[in-house]
Image (spheres, rainbow, N blue to C red):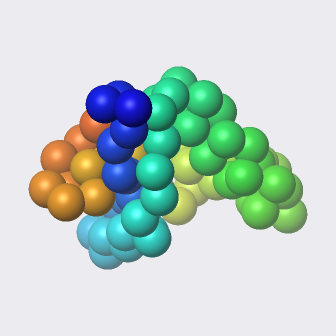
Amino acid sequence: MSDLIYIRVLQHDTEDNIRIGMTFPTVDIDATVDAVKANYEKEMGWCGGFEKACKEYWKRVALVNAETLEIVKVIYQR
């Protein structure tokens, strides 16, 4: 299980506030990206879904290493 890494979701909003979510483990970054997008799509349905919310509210959404906060995978970036 050497591929197990611990990550967090980072949100950088249009007012330059940064929010970093709770730590969670993953072994498949692409599946995690899909799950994060699906969760955002569900939560942001009131404003038109994930893509519309990104354009309206965020500069960047990314998965980051939970320990170093280094970007592992960018999900959305302007």
Residue 29 in picture, x, y percent from top left: 47, 30
Please state which of residues 51 and 33 is positioned toward the viewer in this rendering: 33
Residue 60 in picture, x, y percent from top left: 38, 48
* The residue positioned farthest toward the front in the image shown: 1
Vertical arrangement, residue 28 with respect to residue 71, above or below = above
Quarter of the rendering containing residue 74: top left
What residue do we see at 35% from left, 51% from top? 6
Let me know if residue 50 appears in the view. yes
Please state which of residues 16 and 33 is positioned toward the viewer in this rendering: 33
What residue do we see at 39% from left, 32% from top? 1
What residue do we see at 32% from left, 74% from top? 17
What residue do we see at 69% from left, 53% from top? 40
Let me know if residue 60 appears in the view. no
Residue 39 in picture, x, y percent from top left: 72, 52
Vertical arrangement, residue 11 with respect to residue 3, above or below = below
Residue 43 in picture, x, y percent from top left: 77, 62
The reply, left or right, for residue 1 in relation to residue 55 is: left
Please state which of residues 41 and 70 is positioned toward the viewer in this rendering: 70
